[in-house]
């Protein structure tokens, strides 16, 4: 049975990992309305950690930003098995940043389709690339 939870271990909270995501992301994908970057890290608690951001520049009210982040978390939670099965087979540890870049509200069906495309693209990249440098995070 699949685990549909999204525990704290799967959330990026380390500032060093966040800095490495935005400075030297190993892989980046843009599928509207998401810009996703990924970096390989060592010694983290979960195989895959996720950071979800919605810019204040596009959504002034915190209520709107939080609602969009909540919907993205839900979509990721329900579809993360597509990615985790691949990572578990290769025993790699990654950190992913999902940025919502649209200036309009989130249409759930469109966002779900886009995030599934992103997850599949990341899974394909992981299958294809076997010699990946791992950045230590201490």
Image (cartoon, grey):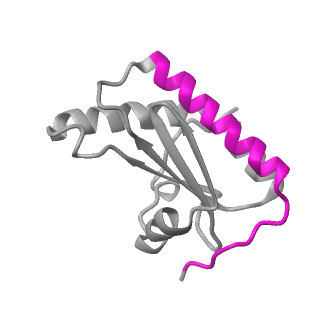
Q: Which of the 4 quarters of the picture holds residue 27?
A: bottom right
Could you tell whether 44 is left or right of 55 in the image? right
Looking at this view, name the residue that lies furthest to the left: 61
- Quadrant (top left/top right/bottom left/bottom right) for the N terminus: top right
Residue drawn where x is 77% and y is 66% of the image: 132
Q: Is residue 137 above or below residue 41?
A: below
Residue drawn where x is 32% and y is 43% of the image: 54
Could you tell whether 118 is left or right of 19 in the image? right
**Residue 117 within the magenta-colored segment of the rendering:** yes
Magenta stretch: give its range: 109-137
Magenta span: helix, strand or loop, mainly?
helix
- The residue nearer to you, when weighing 134 against 101, is 101
Q: Position of residue 33 (x, y in %)?
A: 45, 31
Q: Position of residue 15 (x, y in %)?
A: 40, 71
Residue drawn where x is 82% and y is 56% of the image: 129
Q: Which of the 4 quarters of the picture holds residue 59?
A: top left
Residue drawn where x is 57% and y is 62% of the image: 25
* Count of picture labels: 0
Q: Position of residue 47 (x, y in %)?
A: 65, 57
């Amino acid at each position: 049975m699949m685990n549909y939870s999204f525990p704290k271990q799967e959330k990026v909270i380390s500032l060093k990992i966040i800095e490495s995501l935005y400075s030297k992301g190993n892989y980046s994908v843009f599928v509207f309305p998401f810009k996703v970057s990924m970096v390989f890290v060592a010694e983290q608690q979960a195989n895959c950690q996720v950071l979800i951001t919605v810019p204040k520049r596009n959504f002034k009210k915190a209520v709107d930003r939080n609602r969009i982040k909540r919907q993205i978390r839900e979509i990721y939670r329900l579809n993360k098995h597509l990615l985790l099965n691949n990572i578990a087979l290769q025993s790699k540890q990654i950190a992913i940043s999902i940025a919502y870049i649209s200036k309009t509200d989130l249409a759930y069906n469109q966002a779900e389709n886009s995030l599934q495309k992103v997850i599949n693209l990341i899974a394909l990249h992981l299958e294809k690339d076997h010699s990946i440098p791992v950045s230590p995070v201490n």
